[in-house]
Image (cartoon, rainbow, N blue to C red):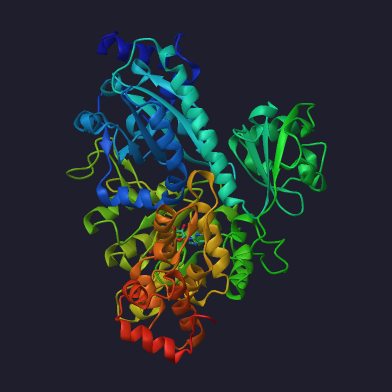
Amino acid sequence: MASHVDHIREIESVGLGAATMRDATVVQSWLRCINKHRLDPAQACEAYIVPDTQLREHRQQSEELITIARSGLESLFRQVAGQNYVLLLSDRAGVTVDFYGDPLFDNNLRKAGLYLGSEWSESRAGTCAVGACIEAGEALTIHQTDHFDNTHTPLSCTAAPIYDIQGGLSAVLDISLLSSPIKKASQNLALHLVSATVRRIELANLMAQSSREWVLRFSRSPEFLDVDPEAGIAIDGSGRIIGMTNGGAKVLARSGNLDWRDPQALIGQPLSRFFDMDIDDLPDLTRQHRPQDRLVFARDGNALFAHAIEPNIAVRSPAGARHDIPTSLRNLSGGDGQLAALQAKVAKLAPRPVSILIQGETGTGKEYLARAIHEASGRTGKFVAVNCAAIPEPLIESELFGHLPGAFTGAAPRGRIGLIEEANGGTLFLDEIGDMPLALQSRFLRVLSERELTPVGASRAKPLDIRVVSASNRPLEALARDGGFREDLLYRLNAATLVLPALRERSDFVWLLDKILAKHRMNGEALAVAPAALLALKAYHWPGNIRELDNVVSVAAVLCHNGVIEVSDLPEALLRRALPQRSEEPHTQRGALEAVLASCNWNVSQAARSLGVDRSTVHRQIKRHGLNHRN
Ligand SMILES: Nc1ncnc2c1ncn2[C@@H]1O[C@H](COP(=O)(O)OP(=O)(O)OP(=O)(O)O)[C@@H](O)[C@H]1O
């Protein structure tokens, strides 16, 4: 193996334009490390693990993706069992948010950075599989001395990007070895496995997010079409493309002679632009027809087998003019009146650079809404979420503003780009803004007024183009009146205010539930809720709102048999509260009681146990509501 000195020399000479046998992706990454990230190959740095608070935030942001990716990760981990591979799922920032490795090697893995919380962005770690994959947008292997930093040269890492259905890179799946054979070709199988897993994760994601739309899946062979398709696209009722896997984007781009890296050119286009068919032809491509008869022709002459999956119309959103609402915003509600008004307002505000303040109880979807605003804004930069309550006060300034190398004791040796700068060209989401320390509020106010940023330790300001969306579940006006929040900052933040209703106030509960069921379906099998359990869920008052509903469904999905959630799969605390002693809604109360009784075959003792009340209370309630075993 080349010595460290040879390795440094090789990178330096490639930096000066010398020819090399390395893959083009490696060379491009080395050049970025030298020219863009200003890294020095002679300066070795240990792998970086982000602090716990930050990790929690990264994981929270990737919650949905982790859930969807998990079954793919588990099956990949099973396939490579016993071969010492480690699996990392990293978010767009290169931070490892999920991890599968052999606990026997925990210490070595942690030291090597193959661990939960490790940050593998190219600017931090130099050329590495995750970082180079984020930059290149394609699957690749970074093998041993392909790494830029000497510290990482024992590793062999292979990574593939996971795209969201709008074509944005949302995560990276990496499979790594602490030590591997010398030849890079030894990792070709790993490259194939990671790419196949990502393809399945993207398809699962497309299915989960497009359950109310037509989904068209493609394969070059009729045998694999229905079991393991290669690509997928989602199409709305008017025949326009509204989502795709990366494979789907490539099929469309090839057909339309467009660039798959420019998803805006694909999303929103009519199906007929890419295929010799339109929406009316989709029913002929469903499973009722033989796979070999489902051949479709792309505009570039390419022929593919297709499988059309009908929209799931179990719960229809009410008719109304939703056509001028961008796709990302349509996901916000299933026809609730208050939200429909909010969606219309957001559709108008999103493309404009106005600051938006979102208010709502915990778990009502403030961050979800902020992301939807970002997606509908057309801004090309990142969505960066900062939870002001989660970052310890002494760290918040350098986290937000970044710092130069050596700006203060304990500063990162290479300096650090702050979260505000990371959001340049995109959206900065400030959650729990009411918890931002007062001193920082003044600094932040300057950033907003002057639209420029000065990192800690820097003397010159940098120009900034950010859209700020902030959120709070505390009444900021009252906080400002009491001196806990700067009034002038409040006015900068709330050019528009959006209020998210609590879940118990929403009329589209069943629509939301359906969406969350689709998210948690296990191994692609549909989840359903038994009528009694649905009554109990509807009767509950949901203090934790959509997040609580999501948690309840995720646990019930694991507990239930044959994919049907019964009352017994719901938490006792929920059932207890679903049947309050004094309810203003006797109908709901009666329904919930009936539901619980039906689930235990009218065994009053069992019903009392599952409700956490005594038998006499159940008897009293039965009498009060005039319930009868036979009615
Ligand atoms: N319209 C929606 N459809 C599906 N899931 C949703 C929707 N809105 C929110 N969720 C889910 O509900 C959970 C809570 O949402 P989110 O984190 O955006 O709430 P929040 O109001 O920002 O919470 P907090 O006040 O605690 O910060 C997340 O899992 C999110 O994915």
Is residue 141 toward the left or the right of residue 306 in the image? left
- Which quadrant contains ligand 1? bottom left
Would you say residue 495 is visible in this rendering? no
Point out residue 15 in the picture as x, y percentages from the top left corner. Answer: 41, 17
Q: Whole-percent x and y of residue 374?
A: 54, 55
Quick one: quadrant of the N terminus?
Answer: top left
Residue nearer the viewer, 215 or 482: 215
User: Where, quadrant-wise, is the C terminus in this rendering?
Assistant: bottom right
Q: Which residue is drawn at the image coordinates 39% and 31% (left, top)?
A: 78
Q: Is residue 76 visible?
A: yes
Residue that appears at 27% across and 52% down: 53
Occupied quadrant, residue 413: top left
Residue 31, position in %: x, y?
43, 22
- Identify the residue at the far front of this view: 630
Viewer-closest of 312 and 483: 312
> Considering depth in this image, is 201 or 572 the residue closer to the camera?
572
Give the side of residue 595 with respect to residue 216, left or right: left
Residue 394 in the image: state x and y as whole percent: 22, 56
Residue 339 drawn above or below residue 424: below
